[in-house]
Amino acid sequence: MGRITLDKVRKAFGEVEVIPPLDLTIEDGEFVVFVGPSGCGKSTLLRLIAGLEDVSGGQIRIDGQDATMVPPAKRGLAMVFQSYALYPHMSVRKNIAFPLRMAKLDPAEQNRRVEAAAEVLNLTDYLDRRPGQLSGGQRQRVAIGRAIVREPAAFLFDEPLSNLDAALRVGMRLEISELHKRLKTTMIYVTHDQVEAMTMADKIVVLRAGHIEQVGSPLELYREPRNTFVAGFIGSPKMNLLEGAEAEKRGATTVGIRPEHITPSATEGQWKGRVGVAEHLGSDTFFHVHVDGWPEPITVRAGGEVDMNHGDTIYLTPDEERMHRFDAQGLRIA
Amino acid sequence: MATQHSRTAARIMMTPAVFLLLVWMLVPLSMTLWFSFRRFLPLRGGDQGFVWFENYTRFISSSSFWPAVQTTLVIVGGVLLVSIVFGILLALLLDQPMWGQGVVRILVIAPFFVMPTVSALVWKNMFMDPTNGLFAHLWRAFGADPVVWLSDVPTFSIIMIVSWQWLPFATLILLTAIQSLDSEQLEAAEMDGAGPLARFGFITLPHLSRAITIVILIQTIFLLSIFAEIFVTTGGAFGTRTLTYLIYQRVLESQNVGLGSAGGVYAIILANIVALFLMRIVGKNLDR
Amino acid sequence: MARAVTTQRKAINTTIAWAIGLLIFFPILWTILTSFKTEGEAVANPPVFLFFDWTLENYAVVQERSNYMRFLWNSIIIAGGSTLLGILVAVPAAWSMAFVPSKRTKDILLWMLSTKMLPAVGVLYPIYLLCIELGVLDSRAALVVILMLINLPIIVWMLYTYFREIPGEILEAARMDGAGLKEELLYILTPMAVPGIASTLLLNFILAWNEAFWTLNLTAVDAAPLTAFIASYSSPEGLFFAKLSAASTMAIAPILILGWFSQKQLVRGLTFGAVK
């Protein structure tokens, strides 16, 4: 079981309040991603849950039990760190067995569990190596192995993929997702990368300056961002946010339209502009279009092999149904 | 990164070290201060009460004070000059590609590990002895009269001995600093048309300035209190009495504790002035 | 990338460097050589370098006449004892400062350093008096404690700089894995810090071994270590070069060997981490 409840949890470093009182419930078996720009307090929040930092106020409950003052070792949670934090002086086997050794498990049982974890993570051949002799991806798997052998109530991941190169990151993302499907254990995952959030999460928690901006499934956040911050943060490339005449026309202070919800055309459309930079990715083409009289270029997604280039005239038509409207406070107008 | 629990543990674990050093600093220091205000001659009447600042004025106005200050400055300055100048040259040399670099490094560093009493004694007898010393043999071989090193040029001799001991230290630190210089910087300067001398002057030397400052400060602190080298070679005779040695003589040889303690307070103040600069550098380094 | 250097240039470097290296090393070499000569050969003019009758007689005489072993034993006890004691006190303190830093950590570290700057001569009499009062003048125990105290700041500093290189996340990982404070120190920190602790031990052993202010002033007979043993040769009656050399060689040989192992750590230890 791993249901984690944060009740008015607050954190201040001296005078500076990094997390104002915050409520959040993480259901058992859920894959929750905390996402936000750097400095938004997502890692601090994770460390509060882990017990590596003391809360300044409020209560943390794990499976209904008050865990606020429980030391990290006793919370029954496992954590995978950004730097992997493997013990460099121990072999992979000893690394993975360390939590079991701390729990004073019988050596035979320790061994059995380590072998099983290694099997799952494809580490069997590396058990007697030192972490220093492993590649980044392998180290990552050792860190995960060390977490799973404990059979924790929940896994905590602190930006685990940010030290890997792009190709490996995609692979590990899938592995972690698969692991979650198989173990069905609660996972809390911190990242600044909204792609990781969108692809892995059951539930995304968007944070900014210690505040929860929105909680919801990836598609909820995509379809109905509650404010301009979430609108701009979720989705790639970013949503275009327009102010001024276009917004007023639609009864809002700001309107947003995603690049994929604009239809480009060489001949006709609502807005007329000039192609600035054209990024041809093969599967997609992104145009950065300068529309006459607008301060910022807007981004448009077109099909893979559209042949338009720098300087060409382009006509754009937004999908009015998919237009997001925000008021002067930046909040969504329903 | 800490919880209340670990902070409490940390405080407890720090206590012994802090407590010991606090006692080590405060008890003798306050005793020295106390004695410095009293007339205290353990062998001639013992503690004869407060004389307040008389010891301080007497220590300064005694005929041996200013010569001692002068000797101290000459020795410290001389050793610093020798070890910095030759230290830079040696460090530059050792940084060049060569065969057996490791062995040369070891040869150069070795004097630092020699016990001060040994190095003083070896130099005094086997090199500087006017009849049997190696230098005497060398001088005679060239038909010159041997120099009576420790009485004719005593300060110079001591500077030589102490420099031999401290040159390795300066070299080692400067070498470490040179090796930490990013070679791309030098290559960029070379691309910009700087010759070897210009590269040394504009890139290497500024890069070394911090290390040089540290060498100066640390050596000054150690050199201000050199003792064994003088104790073994001249015993403070022939104008080689430094401030440290003068205080030592007042306290233990003539057993004038009050006077010696006043001198000790001066020495502490002097060392603290140097230490202050050193601590500012070290402290800045901590913030990174 | 370093460029290829011509062999000729390398040869010149090598020659100059070796010449200077040998020149600097020469007094030590000469001492070692002389220790194997007879007294007559030791003062011969012109001096003899290698072609003399090698003898071990001096070593035997030194041991016989002055009981070298007792001084050696005192040196080992004093240097070793003060270093071990220092490590014992310093490890927890350095751990605290490296992993649970507070606003005062920097001040405490600098304050510790400042005690190291205190000129020994300034507190000579108080310490001397305290030793008499406590009846520990000329005792090994007193020197163990005093040398521990004068080197403690260096030990704390060295360990602190080594510990700071251990990422805090690893210790946090151990905490998450269920390790308590004791297990954390025992299974994670100490094994990871072994190289750092070892070089700290080594350097401080050397410093304590060579310390020549307190060891000269606070000992007479019983506790006198090698520094005092050698100083006793400065009186005229001890003036036999070969024996002096033998005694000197015995006093510095162990440390020269240890010193060569510690040269990499020397810089860090003596500059308080300010030069790396």
Image (cartoon, rainbow, N blue to C red):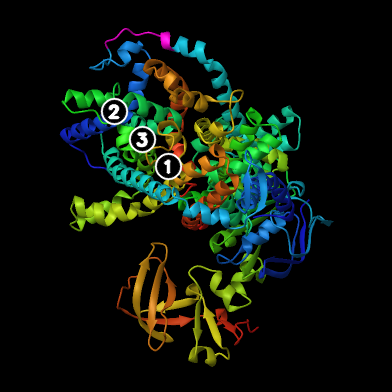
Residue C14 vs B194, above or below: the answer is: above
Total of numbered circles in the picture? 3
x, y (%) of residue C175? 69, 46
- Residue sitting at the far right: A65
Upstream in the sequence, badge 3 or badge 1?
Answer: 3
Please, which chain is the residue tagged with disc 3 on?
B
Label ID, residue B241: 1
Quarter in which the C terminus of chain A is drawn:
bottom right
Q: Which residues are magenta?
A: C51-58
Label ID, residue C105: none
User: Mark 3 or 1, which is nearer the eye?
Assistant: 1
The Cα–Cα distance between marks 3 and 1, rounded to whole angstroms, is 15 Å
Residue hosting label 2? C22
Query: Callout 2, which amino acid?
Result: Leu
- Residue sitting at the far front: B45
Query: Callout 3, which amino acid?
Result: Ile
Q: Residues within 10 Å of mark 3 (few under 14, many from 20)?
A: many
